[in-house]
Image (cartoon, grey):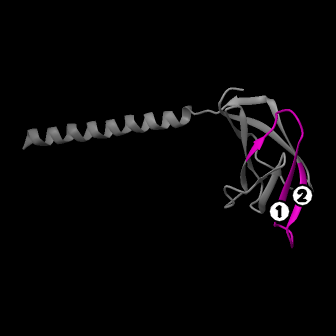
Amino acid sequence: MTDGKYTIEVSLTGGTGRSSVRSPAELEVENGIMTAEIVWSSNSYDYMEVDGEEYYPVSSEEYSTFLVEIPALDTDIPVLAETLAMSEPHLIEYTLKFDSATLKEADTLPIYALVISGAILLAGVIAVFVVKRKKKNETD
């Protein structure tokens, strides 16, 4: 895969079946390394282990969010995740699977469109102000 930002559908199995992760997930590829943003359905996860690597949340305000390196697409990836939702911390086994058939380049157009729209709106406001000021000066 070429370097860039993508979205991809991800499935989660294992555990009690009550937890989930956000799908599609954001995926970034840099120098051939794939890093996925895993957003859990709660903020009670404080640790993940993926492919032997330990990860800690980059955010846990509303949802526990992790940036994890993933080894491959279209394959079951065993994951350990520690939750604090129970009376004491529990390490739970899950499986993630990223579906390459759903891989799409991340849509950056809305950000540019917003910036351009804002600039056009600002130019319009300035033009109206200048015209009104000019008319006021002509009547004085």
Looking at this view, is 22 or 75 the one in front? 75
Secondary structure under the numbered disc 1 in the rendered image: strand
Residue 43 coordinates in the image, percent (x, y): 74, 61
Left/right placement of residue 93 relative to residue 7 reads right
Residue 87 on the magenta span: yes
Q: Residues within 10 Å of mark 1 (few under 14, many from 20)?
A: many
Q: Locate the N terminus and report the quarter of the image it occupies.
A: top right
Residues marked 2 and 1 touching at CB (< 8 Å): yes
Residue 98 coordinates in the image, percent (x, y): 82, 37
Check residue 92 in the rendering and tell me which mark sits there, or answer none. Answer: 2
Residue 79 on the magenta span: yes
Span highlighted in magenta in the image: 68-94
Among the 4 quarters of the image, the one containing residue 26? top right
Residue 84 coordinates in the image, percent (x, y): 81, 67
Query: Label 1: which residue?
Result: 83
* Residue kind at label 1, given as amino acid type: Thr
Left/right placement of residue 33 relative to residue 93 reads left
